[in-house]
Structures are given as C-alpha cells and as structure tokens.
Image (cartoon, rainbow, N blue to C red):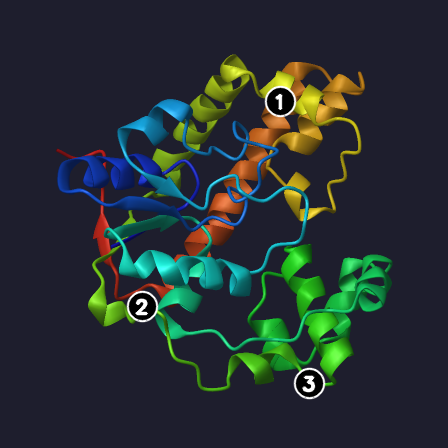
Amino acid sequence: MLVAGPTASGKSALALAIAEAHGGVVVNADALQVYARWRILSARPTPEDEVRAPHALYGHVADTAYSVGRWLREVAPLLTGPRPIFTGGTGLYFTALTQGLNEIPETPMAIRAEGDAIVLPDLLEALDPRTRARLDPQNRARVQRAWEVQRATGRPLADWQDRPATPLLPLARTTPLLVHAPPEVLSPRIERRFTAMIEAGALDEARANAAGFDPARPADRAIGAPELMAHLRDEIPLDEAARRAVIATRQYAKRQRTWFRARMGDWQTVDPTRK
C-alpha cells in the first residue's frame, strides 16, 4: 500500500491506523525523515507511534548523503516481509518505486565540491532544457544533483532517467492513496503543527544540533531548522522564527501538491479527516 501526501496532511497517521487495523510495516518514503538529527522538526513518528506498529527506514542515517537509489536498495528486502505500507511526501521515492529508477554513477567528491561553490541560477542555466523542465527550480539539492550528473558523466540527467527501468513495485500491484489536502485545510494544520513542535521540544532539538549546523547539508534541511537557529543566535524572536517556518512549510507543501498533481493523477484520493 502507498500513502502519499503533502506535509502536515495526516498521511502518517492514516498509514499508522491502517497498520494497526490490518497489520503491516509502516515504511518511510520521506527524504527528510531518514535522518536521525531531526525527529521533531521532520515530523518523524514518535516513540509511542513506533510501539503501536512496526516502522522501517526512519532516522537510520547520520550525516551522510542519502539517495533515492539507496532508498530503493533498502526497500527491496522489505517487499518480501510483512505487508509494507509506504508513506511520505517525497514524490520521487514513490515514482522510483513504482516506475523504476536507472542507477546513476555516484558523484566524485571533487565535482560535488565544485557544485557547492556555484550559485543556484548558474547551476540551472548549465542544465539541458529537458532536465531543467523536470526540476523544482527552488530545490537546490535536486538541481545540484542534476548538474553533478551532467558534469561527471557528460550526459544530461534526463538521458539517464529515460532509460528503461524495471520497477520494484509496479503501481498495478499496489493500493495507491493520495491524501487530499487543499491549502485552506492544510494552512491551519501547518500552523498548529509547528506550535505543537515547539511545545514538544523543537527548540531544544535545534540547540542540540547547533554545533556544526549547515543548512546546505541534506541532514540539516529540516524545515524550520534555519529559523530556530536564527532565534538561538538572538537574530530574531521566537514568534518571528515560527512565522517564517510556517511560511517555508506552506511553500514546501505547495511544491509537493504540484508534483502530486503532475504525476499521481491516477491515484485514489482520500480525505483522512472524513469519517
């Protein structure tokens, strides 16, 4: 089973309810929730949730880079065990799982360092039109990865993506659910959730991760982390940090909805708030 949806839409609660009612393992399909550093700000399942049903691929990565290819390799053995219930907001993970992914050579560290020094508009400009059209132009990690592939292999990322690939789990063999979350419903949920995160200790979590914090590192890209760090440096008050974090979360949710509309039009839409 697949349960996708934008951040704060209730998809994780729905997946957990399904696992409790029918059995199965809740499997993470969110690129931020693989990292150990940010349980609260990445909205990972709580320890109490993890007692209610088995969970897999949450918080198991430290600071190393993590790719969709590695995620697929870790997912493969889970397909032969108890029924996996994939849930998350990273559309690329679901697409790779159900449509296949071509393995792309890893980027040499020297080329990655070269890309780190290039501003986002220049990275975009260097890409071929086909690859550029497939990317969120605000997602530096994806844009830089495309630039690195092109620089390292001499071939555009779109060429690698368009090679035939065999999916691990074809969509026809799944029950694909897409959580319905229009802006008028999601926006107040985002505000309430960030308030709950602060109450749950998000500021202490930021304080614990302050040493060596680097917003360019994938492990430190939890939404709200830069804003809370700015507050801890006495640059902005906490209410301003929260306001900015809520805005950033809304923008991220909008990008997720755009992806889902473009690529998951044949998924069953559900509203977990309806009885």
Q: In the image, 232: left or right of 256? A: right
Is residue 51 visible to the viewer in this orientation of the structure? yes
Tell me how far mark 3 sits from mark 1, CA to CA.
Answer: 41 Å
200 relative to 131, above or below: above
Query: Which of the two discs, 1 and 2, labels the residue nearer the N terminus?
Result: 2
Badges 3 and 2: C-beta atoms under 8 Å apart?
no
Tag on residue 205? 1
Counting from the top left corner in percent of width and height, residue 236 is at: 75, 19
208 relative to 103, above or below: above
Tag on residue 139? none
Tell me how far mark 1 sits from mark 2, CA to CA.
Answer: 36 Å
Element type at mark 2:
loop
Q: Amino acid at mark 3?
A: Arg
Query: Which of the two discs, 3 and 2, labels the residue nearer the N terminus?
Result: 3
Tell me how far mark 3 sits from mark 2, CA to CA.
Answer: 28 Å
Counting from the top left corner in percent of width and height, residue 14 is at: 26, 38
In the picture of the structure, the residue carrying the numbered disc 3 is 155
Element type at mark 1:
helix
Q: Amino acid at mark 2?
A: Leu
Counting from the top left corner in percent of width and height, residue 143 is at: 67, 64
Name which residue lies at 36% across and 40% down.
55
In the picture of the structure, the residue carrying the numbered disc 2 is 169
Counting from the top left corner in percent of width and height, residue 8 is at: 41, 35
